[in-house]
Image (spheres, helix red, strand yellow):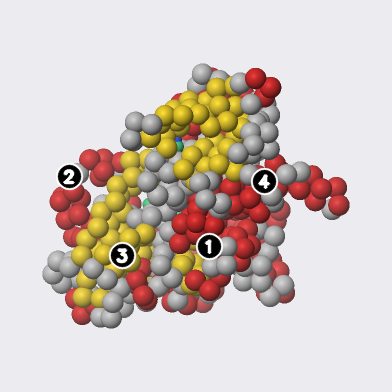
Amino acid sequence: MNDESKVLILGGGISGLSTAWFLHRRGVAVEVLDVGARPGGSIRTSLRQGYLVEHGPNSTLQKPGGKDDALGRMVDDLEIGGRLIEAAPAGAKRYVMREGRLHPLPASPLTFLTTPIFSPLAKLRLPREIVTGWVDHEESIADFVRRRLGRDFLTYAIEPFISGVFAGDPEQLSIQAAVPRIYGLEQQYGTLIVAAIMEGKAAKAMGSPSGRLVTFDEGMEVLPATIAEKLPSGTVRGGTEVIGLRPGEGGIWHAHWRTAQGESGVSSARRVVLALPALAAASVLFPVAPAASQALSSLAYAPIASVALGYSRDRIAHPLDGFGFLLPRKEKIRLLGALFSSSLFPDRAQAHKVLLTAFIGGAMDPSALNLPDERLIGQVHEDVARCLGIQGEPEFVRLTRYQRAIPQYHLGHLARIEALDRALEPFPGLHTRANWRDGISVSQCVRNGELLAKRLTGEEEEEEHSA
Ligand SMILES: Cc1cc2nc3c(=O)[nH]c(=O)nc-3n(C[C@H](O)[C@H](O)[C@H](O)COP(=O)(O)OP(=O)(O)OC[C@H]3O[C@@H](n4cnc5c(N)ncnc54)[C@H](O)[C@@H]3O)c2cc1C
């Protein structure tokens, strides 16, 4: 491949692959190096004993048709629109536990008034949100929520939601970095209640749904597998570990790699995208840009274990009519929560069977990952059984451990990313694109891949000039 125009991408998770795809569609030659045996990084699906198991993401949120819908554009481009499946409508219902019982989160003002999830005092306090003032410093999610909505909302809505998305600790996560949309609503409207009303009205007026949960007929892995398959043959080199990056003559970069079979080699290009997990990117950058490497090594991750559990439907008392359930820490149950995977996507299990995907660990209980397999699975089953009223043992179990699952956008995260970008300024050929910056969900990684492809092809500037 021609080193002059080619873009070399280190890391073949969805961030690296979507950058590769959007560049390829703009006529740019790409090469992707990934240490994994199969493309996709955290995205992995397997079919065992009739259960379609997602080891990583189970679905992702698509905002169809809009400017941000890079996922929709990519799916169309890859010609897999017919394989996209939307979650069943029941998925809108989410359960949260309070005082040992699961209750659906309120979906309307009336159910808000009657739900036992929030105390009468917390409901009475809510209108005060409208007159709550701003603060002029970076705030943790916990401080932001306590200030605006009160402690009960933090305990029973936000903290479990944050564990569901980030497996994180709201006392440490930055509102500005982790949920910039919510912070932006405060900036724009001054109050979240008014923002919710106005945004709801605007979405209705434009006829645009706020988003839909999607996956593919054979699971999330369809996405990275199809990208790798449709890129020109030899573009994605699996089983290839990048062990160093060195500057060469005339602005060319050389990535040194080795394979498990003992082969080694060098791939070169003028432009390189680091789409690696933060520590791997830090290690590759260390000899070249130590300050950038330092900023990356300071990024924290939360560990998580995902346990797929299969049961006969008649063993479970709960109707399983929703997305799943979340457990506030105050309920003193070790499990973080579970998805009703086969209620969301019915073909995930055979008739009369149920697939649940449960999570344990996270930033607030990292030691759960130290449990040996049998004890960890036993704990998860025991907790799920207690929440859902399950009789007997699961007939199917699959455990996946991630010691470094989800990057944590802690207080100071944006400053760390700024320090990283500053440290890379002397190297205009080096770019970064991964879930440790600008959003962690699959659809955000795809959108960010498209943005980088536009920037590298000068399209972004053209758009700005014509706007
Ligand atoms: C358990 C779990 C559940 C999740 N659930 C959801 C969900 O429901 N919805 C959602 O939208 N998102 C979810 N996410 C988040 C989302 O899946 C990830 O943020 C996203 O897939 C990350 O993509 P990435 O390419 O940035 O990183 P990764 O997927 O981590 O990709 C990095 C790649 O770099 C490669 N690599 C590492 N070191 C080297 C090296 N030295 N040389 C070459 N290659 C290397 C790895 O093999 C990997 O392929 C979940 C994540 C996890 C872990």
Give the crowd class for mark 4: few <14, some 14-19, many >=20 residues within 10 Å.
Answer: some
Give the spatial CA distance, label 2 vs label 3. 24 Å
**Disc 3 Cβ-to-ligand 1 distance below 8 Å:** no
Residue 61's disc is 1
Secondary structure of residue under mark 2 = loop
Q: Is residue 374 left or right of residue 271?
A: left
Residue in the picture at 69% in, 60% down: 67
Relative height, residue 211 to residue 399 (above, below):
below
| Residue 129 in view in this figure | yes
Are circles 4 and 2 on residues that touch, CB within 8 Å?
A: no
Please name the amino acid that badge 3 sits on. Leu
**Alpha carbon of mark 2 to alpha carbon of mark 1: how far?**
33 Å
Residue 372, label in figure: 2
Q: Name the kind of residue labelled 2 in the image.
A: Pro
Precedes in sequence: disc 4 or disc 3: 4
The residue carrying pointer 1 sits among few (fewer than 14), some (14 to 19) or many (20 or more) residues within 10 Å by Cα, namely: some
Circle nearer the viewer, 4 or 1: 4
Label 1 element class: strand
Nearer the viewer's eye, disc 2 or disc 3?
Answer: 3
Q: How far apart are marks 4 and 2 (CA)?
A: 47 Å
Q: Which mark is residue 47?
A: 3
How busy is the neighbourhood of tag 2: few (under 14 within 10 Å), some, or many (20 plus)? few
